[in-house]
Structures are given as C-alpha cells and as structure tokens.
Image (cartoon, rainbow, N blue to C red):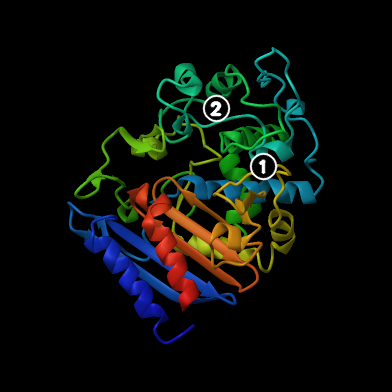
Amino acid sequence: MSPTFAATLDTVLARALQRQRIVGAVLLVARDGEIVYRRAAGSADREGGRPMAEDAIFRIASFTKPIVATAALKLVADEALDLASPISTWLPEFRPRLPDGSAPDITLHHLLTHTAGLSYGFLETPGGPYEQAGVSDGLDQPGLSLRDNLARIAAVPLAYAPGTGWRYSMATDVLGAVLEAATGMPLPQLVQRELTGQLRMRDTAFEVVDAARLAVPYADARPAPLRMGELAEVKFIDGYARFAPGRIFDPAAYPSGGSGMAGTADDFMRFLLSLRSVHRSVLRAAGIDRTGIGAQAQGPGWGFGYLGAVLGDPALAHSPQSAGTLQWGGAYGHYWFYDPVTDIALVQMTNTTFEGMAGALPRDVRNAVYRG
C-alpha cells in the first residue's frame, strides 16, 4: 500500500461523518493476510457521548449469511448434507407452492444461491404478499418462533420455480431450519461448533456477549441519522425494512440464519481471512456464480455464489475489484469484500442503516483501497 493509503481512508471516513451520513464506523483492511489499516471513527452512542471503539459489537444483519452458509458447506464436505437433496427431507411441512398450486422441490443449492423462489418483505412494495402473511425478515417481531415464520413463508406463493430466477430472500433462515433438523442441534450451537468456536470469534454469536460494547443503531434521515427506537421502519428501494433492535436480547426470538447475529469487525475479518487458509475449499465452492441465470445480484457484472455476490465482469460492473471477488452487506449498515486475486479483504461496520450498506460510503471506501 502507498504511503498515502491510510490518509486517504481517513479522509473518506471523516467526510462521511462530517456530512452526517453515518454516526460511527469501524473499518479494517487486510492485504496478504495481514491487517494494513484499522480505524474506529465517530460515535457508538451519539446521545450518550460514547465514541466508537475498534472492539465495538454490532448487530451484523446479513453478515450472518456467509457464516451460516460456511457451516452448511462444511457439513456438505463432511457428507452430512447433500446440496442436491430436497429440503423436504428435513422440513416435510415446508412446501411453498407456485401460483398454479404445484409444490416443486427446493434444494440446499437453491437456498444457498437464493434461487428458491422465496423473497424478502423489505424488497416488496407496502402491502406485499410477505407483509400480508406476517412474515418477519428476521430483523423484527421479537418472540416469533421459527416454526411460525416458516409456516407464514410457506403460505405465500413462490415468486418463480426454483432454479429459474434469482431473488434475495429468506432462504438462509430456511437453511438454518434445515441445519437444525439435519443435525439435531440448535443453530447457535451448530455455528459455534463448526465455525466461530474454531476461529476464536469470541464476540460473534446469536446474542450480545457484552452489552456495554454494543453500538446504538441509527436510521438514515436528513439532516442527520435518527436513533432507532423499539421499532423502526426505514425506506429501502420501493418498500420499508422493519427493525426491532431489541430482538437480539429476546430469548424467544428464533435465531435468524439470515440476519440474527451480533459481532465485531475483527471477528468477521478473522472469518474472511480463514477463506484463504483453513476454508479454502469453501472459497473455491463459493467463488463462482452458482445461479446459472445471470443474477446481477449487485447490478451488471455480478452473479451470486454460496457466500455472497461474485464479480464476473469488473468492466461491466465499473469496479476496480478483480473477477472472482466476493462481497455483500448488512442492513444495519455494513459492507465486506474479499478479492482473491489481489488478496485484499475489507470489513466495514457502521451503526447507520442503510447508508453503511448501500450509500456512498461503501463505494468510496472500496475505491480508496484500490487507489492505495
């Protein structure tokens, strides 16, 4: 990295804070397996005057997905699961139907690639099918059981026949239910056994291990982000995402495989770096567009693998990243990528929804890294 690399990233963070687009952030960058940049900036609790710290704990939302997916892929490698098996093998009551009334098979592969025909409520317009059925996106409705949410999902017609389309969805929550049924273990214990425990990700779990370090969540607003209350609705594309920040403290809330964990930037970086060493087989499996249908998961040039979006055509995507780069985000305001060609890994966690995930900051941070 150039001598100006750190200063450039500092400027990007400072600009986002000055413009009040985010409240606080932790940013880590690794090159060749070594951390080359780390910074905590802004506030973990603006009103309480608590500055952001490098070991701050965040509700990590969809950062949960690649962790749960990796646990599943390890079970596949151990031949405990088969990607081609219909999930009705483990969840016989989960049989969502197409509009014509037929109930096609959904496989583990479909769940991992979000090609199962499922959806997310926050991607629908207000009053959409998932909202009408009372489906939780895994971010709200504390106390809701997984059994009840699966029944609500199954009551909504599939958006398309499995394997014929791509739509970001509740598929990883369903995957969590499959993992529990297949192993006889609660999802939190299974993830700890297969991944977080082995990698010593001590701050990452389906609960908050130290509430004193938990960052307060904020929602996009002008002129400055608003502190979330017990329930927050935040506009996203054509709909609204519903958040109940206290959900993670509710022992009755089911462990959402798609969005239910909390953790730190250091822990997630440890996970990303494991893909270049102990989990290289997972990286090989995940670093290919597995949809076969041109998913455009993050616009032109992007497909989707088993852990997140996969960059197929950097020129078409207008990205400085290399082909084969994996990346995704988290609704509470997070962004990550791993570029296996340049061996650059980045973890950006903020406490601001949705700016930290889908605003200017992730793009500016990414571009600054490659300029360095």
Label 1 element class: helix
Q: Residue at x 41, y 38 (%)?
A: 237
Q: On the picture, is 268 further left or further right than 323?
A: left
- Residue in the foreground of this view, choosing between 91 and 362: 362
Give, as a three-letter code, the residue at label 2.
Answer: Leu
- On the picture, is 137 further left or further right than 58? right
In three-dimensional space, the C-alpha distance between marks 2 and 1, rounded to whole angstroms, equals 18 Å
Q: Which residue is mark 1?
A: 112
SS at badge 2: helix
Q: Residue furthest bottom?
A: 3
- Can residue 201 be seen by looking at this rendering? no
Label placed on residue 142: none
Circle 2 packing at 10 Å, graded few (<14), some (14-19), many (20+), is: many
How many marks overall?
2
Where in the figure is residue 128, as x and y percent of width and height? 46, 22
Between label 2 and label 1, give the one nearer the viewer. Answer: 1
Q: Residues within 10 Å of mark 1 (few under 14, many from 20)?
A: many
Residue 337: name its quadrant: bottom right
Q: Residue at x 52, y 37 (%)?
A: 256
| Three-letter amino acid code of the residue under disc 1 | Leu
Q: Residue at x 61, y 54 (%)?
A: 301
Image coords of residue 365 (percent x, y):
42, 66
Seen from this angle, which residue lies furthest top?
A: 101
Q: Which residue is mark 2?
A: 146
Q: Quadrant of residue 9?
A: bottom left
- In this orientation, which residue lies closer to the viewer: 290 or 214? 290
Q: Are marks 2 and 1 in contact (CB under 8 Å)?
A: no
Q: Is residue 65 found left or right of 87 in the rendered image?
A: left
The residue located at (66%, 62%) in the rendering is 324
Percent x, y of residue 120: 51, 32
Is 90 situated above or below 152? below
